[in-house]
Amino acid sequence: MKKSILLFVGLILMLGAKAQFPMGGPAKKMVTGRITATILDSVTKKPIDYATVSLMKSKDSKSVNGAVTDERGKLSLSNVSPEEYKLSIGFMGYKTKVMTVKTTPEKPDLNAGAIYLSPTASNLKEVEISGQQALIENKVDKLVYNAEQDITNAGGDATDVMRKVPMLSVDVNGNLQMRGSAVRVLINGKPSGTMANSVADALKMIPAEQIKSVEVITSPSAKYDAEGSGGIVNIITKKKNAEGTSGSVNASVGTRSNNGAFNLNAKTGRLSLTGSLGVNHAYPQNSKVLSSNILRDNTGKILSSVLQNGFSKWSRVGYNGSAGLDYDFNNYHNISTNVKINRFSNGGPGESAVQIDTLLLKNIRDMDMGFNNIDWSVDYRKTSKKEGEEFSVSAQLSAGRNTSDFSNRTINELKDPAGITELGSNTGKNNEYTVQTDYVYPFSKTTTLETGLKGIFRNIISNYGSNIAQDFDYDQNVASAYGVLGFKLTKKITAKAGLRTEYTKIKGLSGDGTKFNNDYFNLFPSLILSQTLKGASTIKVSYNRRIQRPSLFYLNPFENKSDQFNIMRGNPDLNPELSDNIEMGYSTFIKGSVINASVFYRSTKNVIESIVTPLPVPAGAPQAFMTSYANIGRSESYGMNLFGSYNPKPKWTLMANIGLNTYNVNNGSAENMVNTGTFLNYTAFARSAYAFPGGWNTELWGVINSPRRTFQGKTDAMYFYGGAVKKEIWKKKATIGLNVLNPFSRDLVINTVNNGTNAKNGSKYEQTTNIHYPLRSFGINLSYNFGKLKFTQPKKGIKNDDLKKEDQGGMGGVQN
């Protein structure tokens, strides 16, 4: 804590002068205010982006200010002196609207609320098409999936939402990949300590009704933390600022899980308050689990075998909540703070019939995992009279406590009915302190410099019951600085070039007295070139270098023996992954249709993957396998992604996405040579949505993920499909709907095979797992909106993007 305070004070002292923004002396005292509004289509009630707004004095019609609306139709005019004005709003295909507005010294700020533009008669059909296409937005540096426009998300969780986001691949446990590589997941541009152990579990605790949109950033600039070789996924929730009071209530009941969500927004004057609460309860359901461990000599003869046939009955329950405050001192100074609390647990009993060679046994087990976390952030932002200039200081505290408890009893019903019981308990504490400062300076309308400093201090302590040999104390400190320059090469070519430096220092101590230290310095360059073509088309070329540091899930040496024949343990000696990424993308709009295509190349060093090895056991003892993690080698991957959206009719939208990427890993190690060869992975998504008269909406969708390869084996292909129908009620303030997921098959069968060869004696081993995961569900949901939302610009804050998260949904069992 002392380190974070010292660094925070240091940053303030170093940058205090910059915070004053040298403008040739102190600014004159004058009362100025701000005029804000939201520009909407009068027919569809959708925001109109890039509408042109002009502010003119009423007495002489002289223009004094102007702007264009953002992608949410939001308008903000700053530095407005108290007077009476004419506000003129226009956009191609709409009737220009002129209205009178007035500000006074007593009330320098004016919120004009929602302003509706009427489309011309020839533009009505086009407006309807635009409303249907709002589900997917293609930006210069990212693709945005507007989840709140997708009716099939109601009643689900964030995992269900992620399955339908273009370019993402999601398995049944909610593990995310983009183009065959791991991604960094943020919430509202910030990390959450809840994800420090398990991203998959954290996503399952966010009700889909709380998600506004999902941003997929494939080529992050040097401004972002360098984490995530595949890119960044940013989940934007529905926590918004609004004048007056507004919010929403959502509830869903289903055969697989129940969800509830509440969002509240309030604003009075310069003060904004937000709050949210989400709850989730997944019913315990039996998942059939078949597994085998087989060890053979170099001739193929079976030396030992362990076969298990049983079930796992897991459940999940928890909640997440947040509260935020935002205050504008004036047009130039803003402070905000936010607190997020997450608490949930999952686990349950399991039972298996075990055959060890010819011996028959019974195994009874239980597993309980708990996750508790609090995130508290404070952000200060200062702007100046120079449009686009901005200085900010942010701090964040994350404190988490995670527990894992298991019991495992093996019974020989003929000889030893009491059996042998093994107990295990692990408590992990993860504290993280972050301070950062950012500065944006526009040299001109076409050239902007972004720069900043950041420090992250992490301490992880893992205690293992009475076995102190497995205790783990780990410190990781990261210092970074960046600079990004955006400029115009030509009238149609925009460039953004940047460099980020990061220094990482690691030290740790295992319970057995083993100490380990590591420090490394990395440079992360980035470059994006974007050219506008004829016909609203854009072509983009980008390069960036990324890193993935292993998180606690990978490092923790705690041995999870909830299945004593398949033990899991982390590896504190892991090195980070480093990757270089090159991408070329093309997007266009053709008569209301959207097409986005991209190709990429990625080279990754020190690839981290799970590794399965047989444990040494006494002669005649059952063979147990250990699953851990290792840096297995280098990977080179090529791939492409193609997304398209088409409207056969104004109210009918067809959408499809397909992604391909190659997988291969190799190294030249004499002791453990790896050469997997090259495999092709794919993911495909299709959606059809139709809006009927009377407020009825229907949708069908499906996802297919190809077999997933690792250097030791593969997991078979998986597919998901579903549909929904929704009806607007209560004067469109509420909706009621029905959802279905995989209605024609109760279980999703997941088969995984891992195999290897012992380099010393040539013996071969194989581990197989066959899981029948209960996925089918039916549900009913109700959503009610109250008040009137008027969106504001998102605030800047902490964005820790630097830790590799797990590629498993949890340890010790199958999760619902």
Image (tube, grey):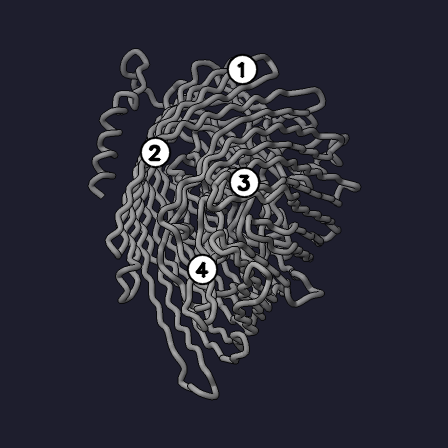
Residue under the image location 25 percent in, 29 percent down: 12
| Neighbour tally class for label 4: few under 14, some 14-19, many 20 plus, Cα within 10 Å | some
Left or right relative to 92: residue 626: left
Query: Of 680 and 540, which appears nearest the observer?
Result: 680
Q: The residue under label 2 is which amino acid type?
A: Tyr
Percent x, y for residue 605?
48, 36
Task: Identify the residue under disc 3.
Answer: 666
Q: Earlier in the sequence, mark 3 or mark 1?
A: 1
For residue 106, say whether it is visible: no
Q: Are marks 3 and 4 in contact (CB under 8 Å)?
A: no
Looking at the rendered structure, which numbered label has been put on residue 761? none
For this orientation, the residue located farthest to the bottom is 414
Task: Identify the residue under disc 4.
Answer: 626
Percent x, y for residue 401?
33, 57
Q: Secondary structure at mark 4?
A: strand
Q: CA distance from mark 4 to mark 2?
A: 30 Å
| Neighbour tally class for label 1: few under 14, some 14-19, many 20 plus, Cα within 10 Å | some
Q: The residue under label 4 is which amino acid type?
A: Met
Query: Of 543 and 635, which appears nearest the observer?
Result: 635
Task: Identify the residue under disc 2.
Answer: 520
Q: CA distance from mark 3 to mark 1?
A: 41 Å
Q: The residue under label 3 is which amino acid type?
A: Asn
Task: Identify the residue under disc 1.
Answer: 488
